[in-house]
Amino acid sequence: MLTNKISKPSSLLTVTALAGVVSAIAIPAQADQWRGWNIHPPSYPNSVALESFADEVTEKTEGRIEPKVYHNAVLGDQPDAIEQTRNGALDFANFNMGPMGPIVPATNILSLPFIFKSPADMYRVMDGEVGDRFADALEEKNLVALSWFGSGARSLYNTDHPVETPADVEGLKVRVMNNDLYVQMIDELGGNATPMAYSEVYQSLKTGVIDGAENNYPSYESSGHYEVAKYYSLTEHLILPECLCVAKSSWDDLSAEDQGIVRQAAQHAAEEQRQLWEERARTSRQRVLDAGVEINEVEDKAAFQEKMQPIYDDFAASHPDLESLVEDVQTAQQ
Ligand code: GTR
């Protein structure tokens, strides 16, 4: 009988071959499931844009890549997430350039206080050739920046009094993002800087561990910081770009076609984020006003700017190689 003639190895071979055929027929190619980090709650402009990015990539790659966004920093704080994306444990993220400085020194140029004259200037610089040079610097550290989001202007807020002059910052304990440059920024104003994760700020304001922090309207409002720190002073000292970044290892795994799809989806997401941002900045401002926040203009911004000069001088002394890029960012706004 035929069955008697089949030796064990060949029957195994048949089973294996059959399994191969079955899997080829029944199971579609494995989708590449991408994990994406986001610090904000789902309704935030950046979060909505990241979801659109995920949907567009899934649809246009016909499910070859399925990005999933994890909101509210559930995958870790920003400095952690930057590391995880650099080593490929995470596939994509929306990162603020503030905490990027310790890893990618060139990005500290973007953190020099008052380097950008307005959010519109920031977009123009980052969307052009100068922005590409920041993307190159990020790529050297395994982060592929595909588009730039906006984050308005950051201003100081605290629990005690309006800040109108640099002297009003004296003695205030101010939370900053994780970057020595911001420690110096607060020091130059006579305050005490405390680098701290975003997720810890609310509680720290409430318990008096810190007196204040600095951020844009949407973050000040969505984080609830306005409930505890009622004085928001329009210093507008930082206008920081944010990237939609992909891990270099995930990027390099893509075909040229899929890279094109992902890049285009990231650009669409940035367009959407920038539009949503404008609306949200207005509604956030109104919400905090309705909640009793006192917002004050800072008449003499030049006084704050002058205090920042040592930061520029120290940066020039410690990074002579980056001086021409500092100048290019400045001249691109003239
Ligand atoms: C927000 C920014 C976040 C984070 C946060 C912070 O404006 O979008 O990425 O940097 O500020 O202050 O930590």
Image (cartoon, rainbow, N blue to C red):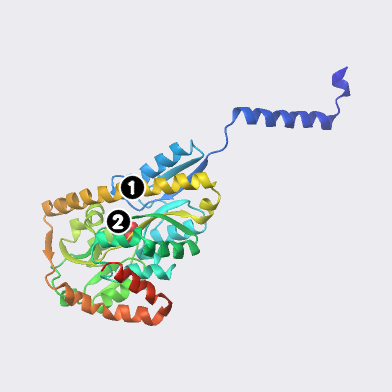
- The outermost residue toward the top is 1
Amino acid marked by disc 2? Gly
| Left or right: 228 in relation to 76 | left
Residue 134: x and y, percent? 41, 64
Cα gap from disc 2 to disc 1, whole angstroms: 13 Å
Q: Answer above or below: position of 43 versus 221.
A: above
| Disc nearest the viewer among 2 and 1 | 2
**Residue at image x 64%, y 31%?**
24
Q: Answer above or below: position of 89 versus 311.
A: above
| Label 2 neighbour load within 10 Å: few <14, some 14-19, many 20+ | many
| Left or right: 54 in relation to 159 | right
Amino acid marked by disc 1? Ser
Displayed quadrant of residue 52: top left
Residue 165: x and y, percent? 14, 74
Q: Which quadrant of the rendered structure holds the C terminus?
A: bottom left
Q: Which quadrant of the rendered structure holds the N terminus?
A: top right
> As rendered, which of 276 and 271 lies closer to the eye?
271
User: To which residue does mark 1 refer?
Assistant: 47
> As rendered, which of 116 and 280 lies closer to the eye?
116
| Label 1 neighbour load within 10 Å: few <14, some 14-19, many 20+ | many
Q: Which of marks 2 and 1 is nearer the N terminus?
A: 1
Residue 171: x and y, percent? 21, 76
User: To which residue does mark 2 refer?
Assistant: 150
Residue 226: x and y, percent? 19, 57
